[in-house]
Image (cartoon, grey):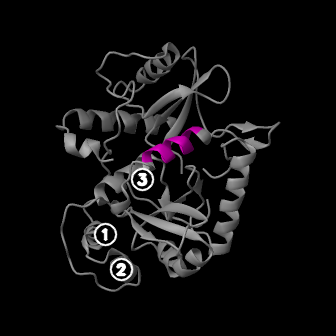
Amino acid sequence: MKLSISLLLCAASLTACAKSDTPSNAADAEKPAARTADAKDGDSKTASAPAIDLKDPNAALSGDPKDIAAVKALRNMAPQLTPDRVGPAPIPGWRQVLVNGNMLYVSEDGRYLLQGSIFDLNAKKDISQAGLSDYRREQLASIRKEDKIIFAPAGKPKHTVMVFTDIECGFCRKLHEDIAEYNRLGIAIEYLAFPRAGTASPDFKHMESVWCSVDRNQALTDAKAGRTVPDKTCTNPVMMQYTLGQKIGLQGTPMIVAANGVALPGYMPPKDLLTALDRLEEESKAGGGEASGGR
């Protein structure tokens, strides 16, 4: 579900204001549709992200003048706006601005603002997702292997996907029931945490217990089967992964992200997922590395 432009800019501005009053943690800053359950992010916190141009609304603007003009135009509506990425849009005369996982398009003269898909009628494909997919891929690449819970086939997998999951989500549980079949087909599943009920929920605490377990794979399997996982505490990546999911446009769980950053539509049966990943790989080869589709 996409937020309306006015609500999105308002939320982005309020989030920025809240962040400006909170001391930053330098250590934390360095750490890096089909059937889905709706994500709940009303009590969300904004994740730390790598430094980018125009990130600090109070800093002097620098960089490409067209990017600066786009951000200044948006800040006329939302003074504390903190974009995650700014750059050229896939159509001439426009800039694309990524805000809280949503892509906005601003005309280079700063007059017009659009939100939605851009469809190339000649190429017969949606060209608006490449920027968000690239951002997802770059952000997810920063997650350490030891911070994931990985179920992989023996030997080299044919495909690897990252899956934002929740232990209470019905389709997340269905996906995990099929884990052996995904692996048999050569698909490695790398789980990331996204407790949909929010940071103050029992669900969040339970997922921390899973990630703090000695055998995290078994603990996740038990939790998804409705079995009790002993309460545990430790330094864990659940909060980081939860906030990162919101930043890269997560709208529900499970969110399956292919290696090129394309998000696939919720739960997909093993054979359907293999077909989709094969198609993305072929499109990437044909397009010199750029795959279409997904979201």
Residue 207 marker: 1
22 lies left or right of 210: left
| Residue at mark 2 | 223
Sequence-earlier tag: 2 or 1: 1
Q: Is residue 141 left or right of residue 26?
A: right
Q: Disc 2 and disc 1: Cα gap in Å?
A: 8 Å
Q: Residue 257 or 75: which is nearer the viewer?
A: 257
Labelled disc at residue 58: none
Query: Mark 2 Cα within 10 Å, few/some/many (few <14, many 20+)?
Result: many
Query: Residue 61 placed where, x, y %?
Result: 37, 16
Q: Residue at x 80, y 39 (%)?
A: 123
Specify which label sits upstream in the sequence, 3 or 1: 1
Q: Residue 244, position in %: x, y? A: 38, 50
Could you tell me which secondary element the residue under label 1 belongs to?
helix
Say few, some or many: other residues with alpha carbon within 10 Å of mark 1 (under 14 / 14 to 19 / 20 or more): many
Q: Separation of disc 3 and disc 1 at Cα? A: 15 Å
Q: In this view, does 50 lie to the left or right of 265?
A: left
Total marks placed: 3
Q: Which amino acid does label 3 sit on?
A: Gly
> Could you say which disc has been placed on residue 245 in the image?
3
Question: Quadrant of residue 178 in the image?
Answer: bottom right
Q: In this view, does 199 lie above or below 77?
A: below
Which residues make up the magenta segment? 131-139
Which secondary structure class fits the magenta region best?
helix
Q: Nearer the viewer, residue 285 or 54?
A: 285
Q: Which residue is drawn at 48% across and 72% down?
A: 172
Q: Earlier in the sequence, mark 2 or mark 3?
A: 2
**Horizontal arrangement in the rendering, residue 85 relative to residue 204 (left or right):** right
